[in-house]
């Protein structure tokens, strides 16, 4: 199935052509006056100039053609040249029944699937996830799920920071605290321990301490630089230590991402790209792209159309050292060699836009990617507190992500226990699902590029545009269907019939928007469009529910149609929350 607008537009196009007017004028959109009609075409206004005819005359002629079409229950030409359209209830019901029978509700997978790598995560080894990692993780996960639903082959890469000065600082501080460890013995020839002799808790305390200490102590900082150099040049002990740091860090990160219901197909690291750097640099030199500027090796990436200064992309510093630029370009080389993707999407803080513009231009100019490889920077805004500043703990520090999740789960748990309708254990389990929905919907419902205010009271509310409200709607439908199953012991095939009321029609109209919503969310990398659709669908269902006694309906044919309608509603709600990385409980 195609989006319903496609079918409507096809009929309108035929009507325009029947009046000898080009089909390009037969564009159809959702009505901006739903009190008057469901869809509208403004093509007669545009066609009037070309055909030297009053727009209302064109609209009336096309409307006359369309009035014979059983797809529509109402077609009306309105001055100065609008064509108002309302679908027949029978056509709407037929469309919904087809959706209900088809896989993925009849959504047609792309005929030209792309291989896409999404870079979303970017945590540093030996450092805990904090609130700054939230947006990248959940936006990237949702885009991955939407793209897969459409039919693309999508690979998510966490892209760990594991190779720079932070590693040198950790090694230096560990050596200071535990000089007896074999990693630091120069003449040590034996096997290193199989398991790390330190914990993730120790590492998470060590890095901020070492970083702060290095800023005040030059000798310590130089020692950390030396440790970084030795690690990157194959020191046996430091490499063994680095592997242990990686192992316990990745295990901890996986657990934290699992709590967010976020997963990665690749756990690639900055260090993985290092082996590609020498050949990449040499090729840039040989082809004349890279040149020396004040001792540093750079590539010009400015373009004639630039309205602001775009600095050269630095490849090597004057002392020959690599930079983030070097590693990120080498990572592109690695991705092209290993996966040959059609596109790479970076989900990163929007403040890094200029940096990635340089990287993308350099990659294109120097031929690191194919000409048709699409490189996309998806910059996200900041999660702020109620004071409008970046979200902090009460003490003013950066909040750990696990603490944020715990805080929002506790807020939901307290609300659930106010009703005392379930055991404490069940309430805890439900609070995890509802808390995650509150957190994710609160974030994803905003356009990714915009800043937003984290408001725990609003996000955990069971009313309004919130995750808990969506889940409560799903639980309500589950409850109705369970009661209906108890009454109707025999399983019967349900079919959606022509709508009996306006609220039923309104619900149907939101349901048939599913296909176009998915396409828009996919093309624009926009999870917030899924969020808006979920809210619209929940509102439409709840209005229908409050106006109709579904279980109490005595007319069985009508009741059966309603059950079919809300079953489809439930399935689409569940599909959409899954695209956001949200799950619903059975009761709340």
Image (cartoon, rainbow, N blue to C red):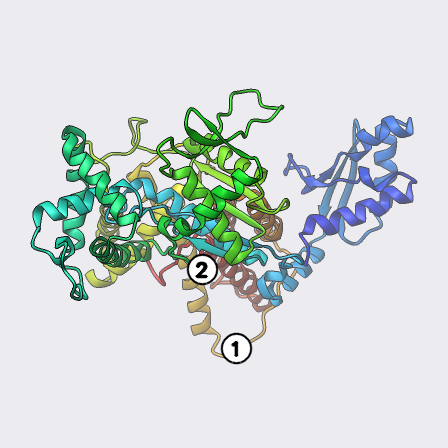
Q: Position of residue 544 (x, y in %)?
A: 52, 51
Identify whether 452 is placed above or below 340. Answer: above
Q: Residues within 10 Å of mark 1 (few under 14, many from 20)?
A: few
Q: Secondary structure at mark 2?
A: helix
Residue 46: numbered disc: none
Q: Nearer the viewer, residue 106 or 477?
A: 106
Would you name the residue on which mark 1 appears?
491
Q: Is residue 423 visible?
A: no
Which image quadrant: the N terminus? bottom right
Q: Out of 390 and 213, give the one closest to the viewer.
A: 213
Considering the image in quadrants, where does the C terminus appear? Answer: bottom left
As helix, strand or loop, the secondary structure at mark 1 comes to: loop
The answer to whether residue 153 is seen in the rendering is: yes
Residue 274 on image: x %, y %: 39, 49
> Observer-nearest residue: 308 or 334?
334
Q: Residues within 10 Å of mark 2 (few under 14, many from 20)?
A: many
Q: Quadrant of residue 351?
A: top left
The image shows residue 257 at horizontal and vertical percentages of 32, 54
**Which residue is at 58% across, 73% downward?**
493
Q: Which residue is mark 2?
A: 477
> How far from the left and from the top, in percent, is residue 187?
13, 57
Q: Is residue 488 left or right of residue 44?
A: left
Q: Is residue 8 left or right of residue 18?
A: left
Answer above or below: position of 302 versus 256: above
Q: What's the distance in space between the residues labelled 1 and 2, CA to CA?
A: 18 Å
Residue at position x 64%, y 37% in the image:
35
Name the residue: 48% across, 48% down: 279
Residue 47 image-quadrant placement: top right
Q: Earlier in the sequence, mark 1 or mark 2?
A: 2
């Amino acid at each position: 199935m195609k989006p319903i607008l496609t079918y409507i537009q096809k009929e309108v196009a035929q009507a325009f052509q029947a009046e000898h007017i080009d089909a390009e004028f037969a564009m159809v959109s959702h009505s901006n006056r739903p009190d008057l009609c469901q869809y509208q075409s403004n093509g007669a206004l545009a066609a009037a100039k070309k055909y030297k005819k009053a727009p209302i005359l064109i609209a009336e002629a096309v409307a006359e053609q369309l009035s014979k079409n059983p797809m529509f229950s109402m077609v009306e030409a309105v001055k100065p040249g609008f064509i108002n359209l309302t679908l027949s209830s029978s056509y709407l019901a037929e469309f919904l029944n087809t959706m209900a029978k088809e896989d993925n509700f009849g959504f047609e997978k792309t005929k030209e699937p792309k291989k896409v790598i999404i870079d979303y995560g970017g945590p540093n080894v030996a450092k805990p996830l904090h609130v700054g990692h939230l947006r990248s993780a959940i936006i990237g996960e949702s885009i991955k799920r939407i793209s897969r639903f459409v039919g693309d082959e999508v690979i998510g890469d966490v892209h760990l920071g594991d190779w720079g000065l932070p590693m040198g600082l950790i090694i230096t501080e560990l050596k200071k605290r535990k000089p007896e460890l074999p990693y630091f013995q120069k003449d040590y020839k034996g096997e290193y321990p199989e398991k790390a002799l330190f914990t993730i808790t120790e590492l998470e305390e060590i890095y901020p301490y070492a970083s702060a200490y290095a800023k005040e102590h030059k000798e310590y900082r130089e020692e950390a630089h030396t440790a970084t150099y030795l690690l990157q040049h194959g020191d046996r002990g430091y490499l063994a230590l680095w592997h242990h740091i990686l192992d316990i860090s990745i295990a901890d990160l996986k657990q934290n991402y699992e709590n967010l219901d976020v997963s990665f197909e690749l756990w690639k690291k900055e260090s993985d790209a290092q082996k590609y750097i020498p050949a990449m640099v040499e090729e840039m030199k040989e082809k004349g792209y890279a040149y020396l500027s004040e001792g540093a090796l750079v590539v010009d990436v400015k373009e004639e159309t630039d309205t602001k200064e775009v600095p050269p992309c630095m490849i090597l510093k004057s002392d020959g050292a690599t930079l983030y630029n070097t590693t990120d370009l080498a990572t592109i080389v690695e991705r092209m060699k290993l996966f040959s993707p059609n596109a790479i999407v970076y989900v990163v803080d929007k403040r890094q836009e200029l940096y990635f513009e340089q990287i993308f231009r350099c990659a294109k100019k120097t031929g690191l990617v194919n000409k048709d490889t699409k490189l996309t920077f998806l910059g996200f805004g900041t999660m702020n507190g109620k004071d409008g500043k970046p979200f902090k703990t009460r003490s003013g520090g950066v909040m750990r992500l696990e603490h944020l999740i715990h805080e929002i789960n506790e807020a939901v748990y307290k609300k659930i226990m106010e009703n005392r309708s379930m055991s404490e254990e069940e309430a805890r389990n439900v609070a995890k699902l509802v808390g995650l929905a509150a957190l994710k919907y609160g974030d994803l419902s905003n356009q990714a590029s915009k800043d937003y205010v984290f408001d725990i009271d609003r996000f955990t509310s069971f009313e309004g545009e919130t995750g808990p409200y969506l889940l409560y709607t799903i639980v309500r439908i589950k409850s109705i269907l369970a009661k209906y199953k108890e009454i109707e012991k025999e399983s019967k095939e349900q079919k959606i019939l022509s709508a009996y009321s306006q609220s039923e029609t309104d619900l149907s109209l939101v349901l048939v928007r599913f296909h176009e919503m998915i396409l828009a969310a996919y093309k624009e990398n926009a999870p917030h469009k899924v969020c808006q659709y979920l809210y619209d669908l929940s509102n439409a269902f709840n209005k229908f529910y409050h106006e109709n006694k579904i279980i109490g309906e005595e007319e069985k044919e009508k009741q059966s149609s309603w059950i079919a309608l809300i079953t489809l509603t439930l399935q689409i709600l569940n599909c959409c929350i899954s695209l956001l990385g949200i799950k619903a409980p059975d009761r709340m």
